Image: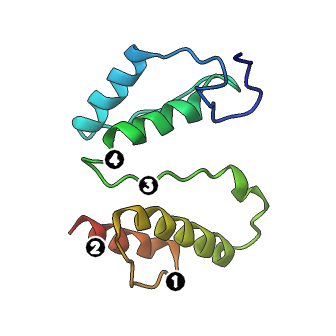
Amino acid sequence: MRRFCTSGPVDKKTCYYVERPDIMKEALDHIENWRYFTVSAPRQAGKTTLLKDIVEKIKDKYITIFLSFEDYKNIKTEEEFIKIFYEEIIDELKRYNYTVKEELNNIREIKKIFEKIYE
């Protein structure tokens, strides 16, 4: 029996979930055309689930890095932010057997790391 999910992301096997093929198609079109997009909706509307579905659909074509900044609210310093942010990127890249050897000392250096990944 399915139930209403009260926290995300939604487990589609056990919870009610309405697929949104129109929104999915639009998001995938934006990605294919290298365009930005935003996902805006009220709480518990399926934003995270939609984004995870998008990542699942494109992961074989693109390197995807899914980060949620929800848990970053208690970070007090730039150094702590950089450390956690960098660790999460490295963890995401392990799915592609990609190892990052560069050090990240400040947030402005993130560009060179992404350029290295792009190569």
The percent coordinates of residue 34 (x first, y second) are: 25, 41
Q: Earlier in the sequence, mark 4 or mark 1?
A: 4
Q: Which residue is mark 2?
A: 116
Q: Residues within 10 Å of mark 4 (few under 14, many from 20)?
A: few
Up the image or down, 75 lies above or below 73; here it is below
Q: Residues within 10 Å of mark 1 (few under 14, many from 20)?
A: few
Disc 1 marks which amino acid?
Asn
Which residue occupies 33% across, 22% down? 25
Up the image or down, 32 lies above or below 3; here it is below
The percent coordinates of residue 29 (x first, y second) are: 27, 28
Foreground disc of the pair 4, 1: 4
Which residue occupies 30% across, 37% down? 31
Disc 2 marks which amino acid?
Lys
Q: Which residue is mark 3?
A: 65
Measure how far apart labels 4 and 1 are at the Cα level: 28 Å
Q: Earlier in the sequence, mark 1 or mark 3?
A: 3
Measure how far apart labels 2 and 4 are at the Cα level: 19 Å
Measure how far apart labels 1 and 3 are at the Cα level: 20 Å
Disc 4 marks which amino acid?
Lys
**For this view, does 32 lie left or right of residue 104?**
left
| Numbered disc 2: secondary structure | helix
Foreground disc of the pair 1, 3: 3
Foreground disc of the pair 2, 3: 3
Q: Which mark is residue 59?
A: 4
| Numbered disc 1: secondary structure | loop
Q: Earlier in the sequence, mark 2 or mark 3?
A: 3
Quarter assignment of residue 75: bottom right
Disc 3 marks which amino acid?
Ile
**For this view, does 73 lie left or right of residue 83?**
right
Which residue occupies 63% across, 52% down? 69
